[in-house]
Image (spheres, helix red, strand yellow):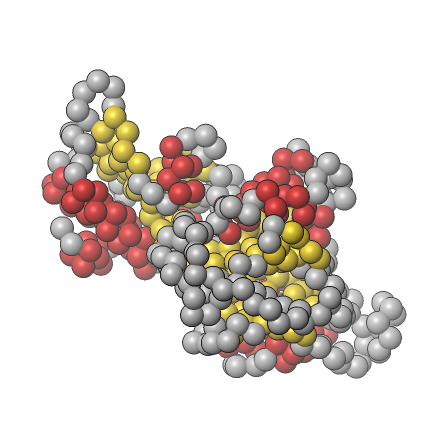
Amino acid sequence: MTLAGTLAAAEAAAPVESLDVVARMLKEHLGAASVSFLITDFTGGSVVRLGAAGTVETGEPARRIPLRGTPYDDVIRTQRPSVEALGEGPGVRVVAPVTNRGDAIGLLELFLPAAPDAGTMREIGETAHALAYIVIANRSYTDVYQWGRRTTPLSLAAEIQHRLLPSSLACEAAQFAVAGALEPADRVGGDTFDYVIDRDTVQLSVTDAMGHDVDAALLATLVVGALRRARRAGADLGEQARQADRAMRAHARHAYVTGQLLRISLLDGGAEFVNAGHPWPLRMRDAKVREIVPDIDPPFGLGYGFGFGFRASETPTYRVQSLDLRPGDRLVMLTDGMLERNVTSLDLSDLIVGTRALHPREAARALVGAIVDAAQGHLQDDATVMCLDWHGVGHSRRDAATGADLTDASRPSRTEPPAFG
């Protein structure tokens, strides 16, 4: 059973039947008694077992399996398969990560009659990797995968909000790894994050719309749409910000959205960003966290009378600023929900240092999870974070498939002075 053969067989099936095809192939080829796919939910803290297409009852709540303290959690965190003996017999359970470019989509679980040899484990790993491609290719055609990710019902505002996020919440490349996490408040506050990789750059954004519930979600939709439209037309960061501001002024008077836009060259590592009234980013270097203090421009749509000194009919200037980013740095972009006013027992800088050994996808979830736990599960505002690890240009030897290994002895040090601060 080859990777190409698995993909071809699944592609020939209907979208909701592709999982069954993979399961059947594994049962026939390896003699597996049972094969399951477990998909990670929106929180990243649970998985949901997807049965055969004919047995998935999407009208029922998805059955949540908490990850904390389980072998499933270890496999997702380490991106290494596990083999566990079943009692005193020869049977074993194998769990393999289903991951594509650092996006931990879920897990492949098999029950085999005997411990697999190295060749069998290699086949299982290749099949799990193929399954990631299958899910990505099919999830736009069916709601089955969306159903599996919803362990709690979404409000209308949360539904809109989640559809604004990138389809993959994490991405791994040779030069960087990036991941985002978002926990809606009891009343959704309009947070979003986004990223895109072009031929020569990676671009990130974090935005926070004023208000709550559907009104905030609609403002977020307007700004994210304007930013994506400008970005896809090839606009630079300053023009992206100006178009977002114009869209707000034209269609959402007396409202505003804060935002932070970042672009990094994949050719020379040069980084630049725009701050539109947004909380400052944090940079960890050599296990020390420092707040980056930029020049602050107005939030998108904010007019005269809010202390920025220009009239509502005037278009503000959005300054594109340089950012000192060196190989080995971790950059954290966030919204003010991560600075939850009711949470005084947590120090965000300490949390960032404490999660430095984790991959950005795990670190982002841990940071948001700590805020949620400290607020006893009831946030006053959305908590959103994007975590970017910069490995540098032309130096990294990382595996971009899973992105679990953070060790890279080839990273050089740079001695040029910081761009500011």
State whether residue 348 is above or below residue 391: above
Q: Which residue does the image show at 44% across and 56% down from the upper left?
A: 409
Q: Which residue does the image show at 76% across and 39% down from the upper left?
A: 344
Give how far across and how far down residue 51 sits, in percent.
30, 38
Q: Which residue does the image show at 13% across and 36% down from the upper left?
A: 31
Q: Is residue 348 left or right of residue 57?
A: right
Front-most of residues 192 and 405: 405
Give how far across and how far down residue 20 sits, in percent.
22, 45
Give how far across and how far down residue 225 sits, in percent.
57, 70
Q: Is residue 335 visible?
A: no
Q: Which residue does the image show at 38% across and 32% down from the upper left?
A: 71
Q: Is residue 408 visible?
A: yes
Residue 180: quadrant of the picture: bottom right
Residue 418: quadrant of the picture: bottom right
Q: Is residue 59 left or right of residue 9?
A: right
Q: Residue furthest top?
A: 88
Q: How many marks?
A: 0
Quadrant of the image containing the C terminus? bottom right
State whether residue 181 is above or below residue 395: above
Residue 341: quadrant of the picture: top right
Give how far across and how far down residue 303 sits, in percent.
81, 72
